[in-house]
Amino acid sequence: MQNLYNELTNPIPEFQEGGVIKYNAPTSVMLRASRMLKTLADTNDTNLILIARLQQREAEVLSDLERAHNEIESYRSSVDSVSNINRTDVPASTEDALSS
């Protein structure tokens, strides 16, 4: 991109008879094109920075989500374990007595 920008803004050599080289200034179209390329390059750089930040934030959110999922699964296991302990600790005859 930088090479193209330089080509558009540098003087243009014109080879004349007798080995004379004349340098012409860039045209207004070339200068406008070079400014547009510069703007596009700057916008591209900004977008690349934003993409990197968004990817980092996405990784953080995914990590938070995985941690929350693991905590939920751990909680469910704990509840299931307590629930199973309560059922197995009480004899069947006691359960019948408590339900009546």
Image (cartoon, rainbow, N blue to C red):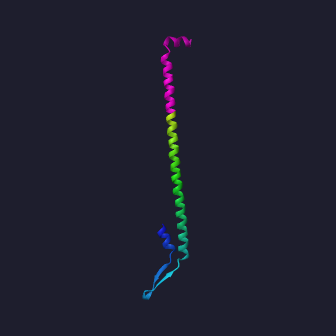
User: Quick one: quadrant of the C terminus?
Assistant: top right
Q: Is residue 45 or residue 31 the one in the foreground?
A: 45
Q: Is residue 83 magenta?
A: yes
Relative to 52, say whether 1 is above or below: below
Q: Main secondary structure of the magenta part?
A: helix
Residue 16 appears at what percent x and percent y? 45, 86
Q: Residue at x 50, y 78 (%)?
A: 11
Identify which residue is drawn at 51% across, 81% down: 24
Which residues, given as a range, are shown in magenta? 72-100
Q: Is residue 81 magenta?
A: yes
- At horizontal 54% and vertical 54% (from top left) the residue drawn is 50
Count of labels in the image: 0
Q: Position of residue 30 (x, y in %)?
A: 53, 74
Residue 46 image-quadrant placement: bottom right
Above or below, 65 against 16 in this view is above
Horizontal and vertical percent for residue 94?
52, 12
Q: What residue lies at 56% left-to-right and 75% top-to-bottom?
A: 28
Q: Farthest residue to the bottom: give it.
A: 18
